[in-house]
Structures are given as structure tokens and as C-alpha cells.
Image (cartoon, rainbow, N blue to C red):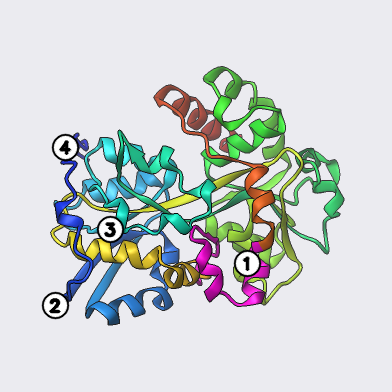
Amino acid sequence: MRNLTLKAVPVTVALLTSTTALYAEGELNALIWCDHADAALLEPFEQAHDVRVNVKEYEGTAAGLAIIDQSRPGDWDVMVIDGVDVGRAVDLGLLAPLPVDQLATASFFPEVVMAENNVINGVTYAVTEKFGYNTIAYDRTKVDPADLESMSGLWLEKYAGRIGIYDYYLPMVGMVGLEQGINTADLTPENVESLRDRLYSLKAASRQVGEVVSSQTALATGEIDILFGGGEWLTAVLAAENPDLDWTIPSEGAVRWAQSIAVMADSERQDLALEFVKYVTSPEGQARLATSSCYWGMPANTEAGEFLADDQKAILRWDQQPEYLQNTQLYPTPDAELDRAMQDLWTDMIQQ
């Protein structure tokens, strides 16, 4: 695989200023997370603009960058990306500037506008679209909720062999750090190493380390009773079938994930791509994205609440968001040295 090289990205937004153009029949190619593949989200946009949205799902920024690396310039028009990785994509010259005056961020939850991720050197390259929490999900018929008021409950002997671990090193190392009193912003290669014994002992008590689908399946089928790293994104889509699945934020806090959406710098359909970004971050688009059949999550736009049913808002815990936002921390944003230390620890843990 060739190396992605740094490309110059102009700061002008001239190619991204159209808001009223009618698009001829055509296509838009989007590199996305699975929640954007839902026809309920895509079809209203396709009908409004007489286009077909072609999507390719990926999981994890490294996988997305590998797909881009193996594609031709212009193959992709839109990209959904982990908020903490926007700067990385900008450094690689992959994302186009966005016109701030056309984005709906004025009605966003203030905590998730996240200029520290989406704005690089004063230029906006992405916009937050959805967020949620990596915390603790569990089956309340098999687990005492009081045990999970503190994250230390995961290490109780009675839950040995009944725990699953979400396989993503950034939030999970961050969570173990919180349990040990280390803020995600304060992680260093040295104190990450101090988490080794704690993480190893949790792995020894776990039944599996798995990605999204396998984690969701294991909790739904009773193969595990607790998922470390789970949250609304895991349990919400299962609520109708299994209302006993629940999630909690322990006293030590949790890690907040946020995904962003951006226009690709080498797209030949940047006007249409911007329209897609605006649609996804509009109240209607946000409500559809929040309740996607793949996984649910909180919409960044507060006005999406007008398009969500009361039972949907209850599942998302809409009214509790101010408390949750206050009691959670952002993903770690490691430099190369810290990222290497975190990945090495995670790989070593999995191999135990």
C-alpha cells in the first residue's frame, strides 16, 4: 500500500457555496459508518436531489484511510470520520473546507460543536453529526445495577467470565484510565503503561473482546451480561426486543464519542456533497441518523428532538444529556508516541 502524502488544500470555499442549485440525475459516493447506510436516511435526500447515494461502510479510521489510499482521486465525495481523527485527515490533505455560515451548528449541543476537532488553523473541515458514550452496558436481570455505580464493579469476582470488552483501544484505555483517576487529556506513555495490570486482570475476567456487531450479539443473546465500552449505541436498537438491556455512566465518568462528516477535497461533486452534509445535520436528517437501524446515538442538533417520538427520546435519554455531557470526557487525542503506547498495550492485552 502506498503512503498517503500531504496535499495542499486551498482555504477558499468557492466550490462549496451553492445552496439552491438543482442537481441533475447522478451519483454521490460516501465513505461511511454503518448508520448512514439506512435507506430511511438516504432516500429522502436521493429523492430531493434526483441522485443515488452509493455508500461503502468501514469501521475504524485506519480502515477508512486504507480504502482512500487504494482509491483513485475523486472516487469519494463525502466521508464520515471519528471526530478525533479530523485533524489527521486534514494533515493528509483529504478534506475540503466547509462554509461555516451554511452549517447548522448554532442549534447544536454546545459541548459537541467541538471546534478543537473540526476546525484546523481557523478553517472548518468537518461538522459533528452524532455522539454518544462508551461506558458500561449490561443486562439488568443478571447484574446488580448498584455494582456498576463504580467502574471497579467490573473487577468483582462474581462477574468473571460474564464480561465482554469493546475492541477499540482509544476509548477503552481511556476508560481504564478514568477508573484509575487519570483524565483522558492527561494520558501519557508512562501512565498508560501503569494501566497494564488493571487491563490484563479485566481481560482475564472477560469472555470476549469484540467489535460492534459481535459485542451487540453477545449481549443480546446472553453470552455476556456486561459489555465494557457499551452504551446507547449498543442497547437502543435492541430495546424493543430486549428492554432489560441497559447502560449506565459510573461515578468515575465515561468517554464520549463523536463522529463528524466532511466533504472530500478531490471530489468533483462538492456542491452536492455539501448538500448531503447539510441534510444529515438538519433536524430531520439528524432524527433519522439518530435512530438508524445499525446503531442509535444522540443527534448533535438539538432541534432533532422535534422529529423524534417520545419513546425514542426516552431510549436516547434526551432529558439527561446535560448531566451526561458534564460527567464524561472526550476520547484521548494521542500524538504518535502516545498512540503507539496505547496500541501496544491493547495488542498485548488481547494476546493474553
Check disc 2 and report the residue beneath it.
Answer: 24
Check disc 1 and report the residue beneath it.
Answer: 236
Query: Disc 4 and disc 3: Cα gap in Å?
Result: 17 Å
The tag on residue 7 is: 4
Q: Is residue 270 left or right of residue 243?
A: left
Give the quarter of the image for residue 284.
bottom left
Q: Nearer the viewer, mark 4 or mark 2?
A: 2
Check disc 3 and report the residue beneath it.
Answer: 78
Q: Nearer the viewer, mark 3 or mark 2?
A: 2
Give the quarter of the image for residue 199.
top right
Q: Earlier in the sequence, mark 4 or mark 2?
A: 4
Residue 51 spot, x, y in % from top left: 22, 77
Q: Earlier in the sequence, mark 2 or mark 1?
A: 2
Q: Earlier in the sequence, mark 4 or mark 3?
A: 4
- Residue displayed at 38% across by 65% down: 280
- Marks 3 and 2 close (CB-CB < 8 Å): no
User: In the current view of this chain or complex, which residue is farthest to the top?
Assistant: 190
- Residue displayed at 71% across by 72% down: 242
Query: Disc 2 and disc 1: Cα gap in Å?
Result: 38 Å
Q: Is residue 306 magenta?
A: yes
Start-end of magenta stretch: 292-318
Q: Label 4 amino acid?
A: Lys
- Marks 2 and 1 close (CB-CB < 8 Å): no
